[in-house]
Image: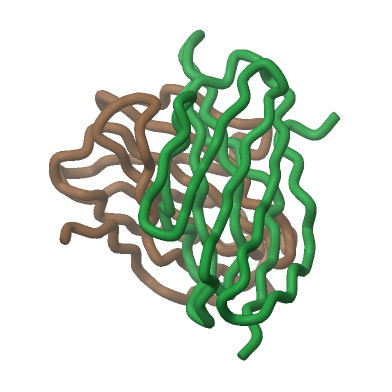
Amino acid sequence: EPEVTQTPSHQVTQMGQEVILRCVPISNHLYFYWYRQILGQKVEFLVSFYNNEISEKSEIFDDQFSVERPDGSNFTLKIRSTKLEDSAMYFCASTKRQGSEQYFGPGTRLTVT
Amino acid sequence: RKEVEQDPGPFNVPEGATVAFNCTYSNSASQSFFWYRQDCRKEPKLLMSVYSSGNEDGRFTAQLNRASQYISLLIRDSKLSDSATYLCVVNKIGAGSYQLTFGKGTKLSVIP
């Protein structure tokens, strides 16, 4: 069964450093998403991406965040200058069509020290 | 009012019990509804979509009441492996919105 994959599983970085989180969505999916979950809190939407552009972004997704689909398979989330409060699990998700079930990757645990 | 509201639990039930979770959502424009389960420090995994007519998948039954903006999940014959946090999720479609909005989840512990 096809799965969303994410790397790395855990990233530790110092405040102010740039990080890139990587995702490989399910191959025939067209819509891609990033969500985050701070420990003990709910899953929160960050951004959606379709047809090589951002479709929607939340208030969390400020100028420090960017997304890219550099090739036909990878989907990345970049945080330019990490802050302590960026520490969270970051989940990538994908879906075939708008409004249908989204499938989540295993997540990247980001720890900012 | 929170966008998606759930009783956080925990629900501690014995094996074999029937347990029901409820969820309310505030945005009447919501058009797709789901239950996901999340194990500790893992990703949300789709359990089932929820349809207006109600739907059943084995021991799991989901119901949607659009008028009351209310979603439910019933688990029959609980197994130890059902222990997890159950996330009520809605998707607002239209006006370019594709995002999923999650509740905080209801924690279920099934006890031997």
Instruction: Tell me residue A16's x, y (percent).
Output: 64, 61
Which residue occupies the foreground of this view, B16 or B111? Answer: B16
Q: Quadrant of the N terminus of chain A?
A: bottom left
Farthest-out residue, top: B95
Q: Is residue A95 above or below residue B44?
A: above
Q: Is residue A12 above or below residue B112?
A: above
Q: Residue at x 37, y 59 (%)?
A: A105
Palette colour of chain B: green
State whether residue A18 appears in this view: no
B70 left or right of B57 in image: right
Instruction: Tell me residue B94's x, y (percent).
Output: 48, 11
Which residue occupies the foreground of this view, A22 or B86? Answer: B86
A54 left or right of B15 in image: left
Q: Is residue A90 above or below residue B16?
A: above
Q: Residue at x 46, y 50 (%)?
A: A78
Quarter of the figure with residue B107: bottom right
Instruction: Tell me residue A60's x, y (percent).
Output: 66, 39
Q: How many marks?
A: 0
